[in-house]
């Protein structure tokens, strides 16, 4: 059995959102189209594979019936968590526009995707530029039986530990929903701070390789700002950012906290202990060291038996299917990583 934590569905046309948009956003999209970030970085056809085009046309991931056959049925999925596309939305300075778009996206998913197969579950997109509107969206749809988490794009004007985001965390905790963080397009408007730790990347290759910088910074902020003491039932999972950096970060945070704990006064235990209780990671992209035993050592150091969950990143160019991941996992981890850890984390039977 397989639970896939990151399946990117999309629309055949941006106009599919029109029935779910209110004015003035509906009229704007009809007249001018959607707003998008442009950083001058070529992401190669949006990062999609070219061998899984739906037979009836449209972009990969735009046909729920084709995805059902090509992914869910093919690999005997228990659940596929739909995570959408368009992660540049939180880099747009107009929070009202961004909030309208993510709300329309959520309604479109509920109407056009969930009825096709009961194995489809969904994340609830929010535009965290305006935490109050984001909290309202969580209250609006957070109790839907097929919503399993809140969804953050990594594009943010400040680290996620900042108290600015507290209304979102209060709402997510109120509805018992974990928060997933996914990489967002970097390099324009509000996306500039999260391009790379060293500044702007010149190419998609450079930016994509350095995505882990952002995850390290966001996780450090969440921990040292005491988010899991302020919101003891809140949980996060980090998607598509790797995990081999985690042991290094845990060791470094624990060591620094011992000497500088007055700067993190809310913490009552080591940062690594909060990670074990509140944070999970996904497999894609699966790390590929030259010696397989090094990967097994990373699994041991990060307690992958309890902290790692499967994600395919379908239909992107670097997606990992379940058989590929199974070949890399020791037998003792296979059931937990491909199914059990996610079932427990999301409360799925």
Image: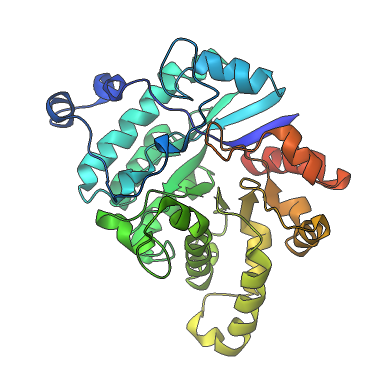
Q: Choose top left, top right, bottom left or bottom right for residue 68.
A: top right
Q: Nearer the viewer, residue 156 or 121?
A: 156
Quarter placement of the N terminus: top right
Q: Position of residue 287 (x, y in %)?
A: 67, 53
Q: Position of residue 29 (x, y in %)?
A: 18, 28
Does any portion of residue 127 appear in the rendered image? no
Q: Nearer the viewer, residue 4 or 348?
A: 4
Q: Position of residue 316 (x, y in %)?
A: 52, 36
Residue pictured at 33% horizontal, 36% vertical: 102
Does any portion of residue 79 appear in the rendered image? yes
What count of labels does the image hold? Answer: 0
Residue pictured at 47% horizontal, 17% vertical: 63
Q: Outermost residue toward the top?
A: 56
Q: Position of residue 158 (x, y in %)?
A: 35, 64
Q: Where 31 falls versus 269 (above or below)? A: above
Quarter placement of the C terminus: top right
Q: Nearer the viewer, residue 140 or 238?
A: 238
Residue pictured at 53% horizontal, 31% vertical: 315
């Amino acid at each position: 059995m397989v639970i896939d934590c990151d399946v990117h569905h999309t629309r055949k046309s941006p106009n599919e959102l029109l029935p779910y948009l209110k004015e003035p956003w509906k009229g704007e999209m009809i007249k001018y189209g959607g707003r998008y970030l442009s950083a001058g970085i070529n992401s190669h056809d949006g990062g999609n594979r070219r061998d899984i085009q739906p037979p009836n046309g449209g972009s990969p991931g735009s046909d729920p019936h084709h995805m059902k056959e090509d992914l869910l049925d093919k690999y005997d999925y228990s659940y596929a968590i739909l995570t959408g596309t368009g992660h540049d939305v939180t880099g747009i300075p107009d929070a009202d526009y961004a909030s309208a778009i993510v709300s329309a996206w959520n309604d479109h998913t509920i109407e056009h995707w969930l009825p096709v197969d009961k194995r489809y579950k969904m994340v609830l997109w929010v535009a965290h530029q305006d935490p109050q509107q984001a909290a309202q969206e969580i209250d609006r749809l957070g109790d839907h039986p097929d919503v399993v988490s809140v969804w953050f794009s990594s594009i943010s004007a400040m680290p996620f530990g900042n108290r600015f985001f507290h209304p979102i965390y209060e709402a997510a905790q109120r509805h018992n929903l974990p928060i997933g963080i996914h990489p967002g397009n970097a390099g324009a408007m509000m996306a500039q701070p999260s391009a790379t730790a060293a500044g702007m990347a010149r190419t998609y290759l450079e930016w994509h390789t350095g995505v882990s910088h952002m995850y390290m910074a966001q996780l450090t902020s969440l921990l040292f700002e005491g988010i899991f003491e302020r919101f003891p039932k809140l949980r996060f999972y980090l998607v598509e950012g790797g995990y081999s950096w985690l042991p290094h970060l845990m060791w470094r945070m624990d060591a620094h906290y011992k000497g500088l704990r007055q700067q993190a006064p809310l913490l009552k235990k080591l940062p690594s202990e909060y990670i074990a209780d509140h944070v999970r990671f996904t497999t894609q992209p699966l790390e590929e060291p030259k010696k397989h035993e090094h990967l097994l050592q990373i699994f041991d150091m990060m307690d992958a038996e309890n902290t790692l969950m499967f994600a395919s990143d379908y239909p992107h160019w670097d997606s990992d299917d379940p058989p590929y991941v199974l070949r890399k996992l020791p037998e003792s981890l296979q059931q937990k990583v491909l199914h059990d850890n996610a079932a427990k984390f999301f409360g799925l039977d």
